Image (cartoon, rainbow, N blue to C red):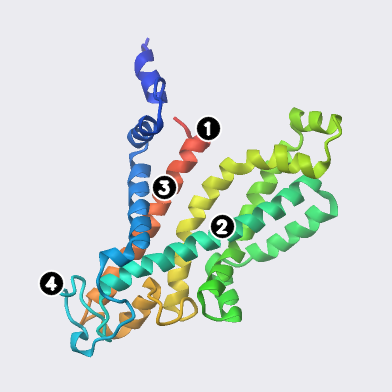
Amino acid sequence: MATIDHKAELARAGAGVSGFWGTTLHLARRYPLGAAGAVIVLIFVLTALFAGYLTSYDPTTTNPRSSLSPPTTDHILGADFMGRDMWSRIVYGARISLAVGIGSTVLGCFFGVLIGLMSGYYGGWLDLLTQRLMDILQALPLLVMALLMAASLGPSLTNTIVAISIPIVPNVARVIRSNTLALREMPYVEAARAVGMSEWKIALRHVLPNTVAPLIVLATAQLGSAILTEASLSFLGLGIPEPHPSWGRMLSESAAEYVRTAPWLVVFPGIAISLAVFGTNLLGDAVRDILDPRERS
């Protein structure tokens, strides 16, 4: 009969761990891939915040003498066909990608939570109406819906955020609604009704806070999709307009004409997009495992 090492199991579960850094170190050891994703995301966040200190070049300034310059000491990642420094454009492009990714995720989650909470808690005709609307929105894939919205609104930073947030709404609304349907039957909700608390106060004070964990998991998963969708929209000319540096637009300007003669114009923006999406996906998987007891081993 196998014996259980109780001390090892307690250590693995984090017993005796205290403090912020102790908890962080314990989670990093238990979820190494999630820690790697967090480091990647943190690097991109710091890069976006301190972009002005990481490069001396303006990402929009052209220099015909440096046109299609390969990676050198002056331009460590080369220059594009207009002589703009690729390193500065990738660094400042991180601001665009994170702004669109975080902005669209927050906006989509806000309206998704609002719709899902009302639909699941009040039910009836409101639930029927909102769910049929969510069915319509979910009939098209995220990228296709974002393409339709971006084409309708026009290319700009604000319109891109709105266009990407709309397909996120039904995904969030579905998750929040399913959690709300279960939470509204809990004993503490019935007790709140018994003492005369109004329905909207019960929904906000007792139901909404208990949907935060699945919301965080879904938001981290949607963040990577939003960044990738922004790159796709910009690649197709419907995302961030010039002269703002966007990883997707950098690819669209270079992929067809310069992929053979100046491959650095395609390789480095592609690596930036891949790392950003890869890091957010790793972080999202780890957050899901941490917050969902059913995923814990």
Please name the residue shown 39% across and 24% down the image: 17
**Please, what secondary structure does the residue beneath circle 3 have?**
helix
Q: Position of residue 120 (x, y in %)?
A: 75, 47
- Identify the disc placed on residue 145: none
Q: Amino acid type of disc 1?
A: Pro
Please name the residue shown 55% across and 72% down the image: 158
- First in residue order: circle 3 vs circle 1: 3
Q: Position of residue 114 (x, y in %)?
A: 70, 53
Please say whether residue 31 is visible from this viewpoint: yes
Query: Pointers 3 and 2 in contact (CB under 8 A)?
Result: no
User: Is 71 situated left or right of 214 in this image?
Assistant: left
**Please, what secondary structure does the residue beneath circle 2 have?**
helix
User: Is 18 situated left or right of 183 in this image?
Assistant: left
The crowding category of the residue bearing disc 1, from other C-alpha atoms within 10 Å (few below 14, some 14 to 19, many at least 20), is few
- Identify the disc placed on residue 293: 1
Residue identified by numbered label 2: 106
Residue 144 found in image quarter: bottom right
The crowding category of the residue bearing disc 3, from other C-alpha atoms within 10 Å (few below 14, some 14 to 19, many at least 20), is many
Instruction: Determine the CA span between mark 3 and mark 1.
Output: 17 Å
- Identify the disc placed on residue 73: 4
Image position of 255 with respect to 136: above or below: below
Please say whether residue 5 is visible from this viewpoint: no
Residue 234 found in image quarter: bottom left
The crowding category of the residue bearing disc 2, from other C-alpha atoms within 10 Å (few below 14, some 14 to 19, many at least 20), is some
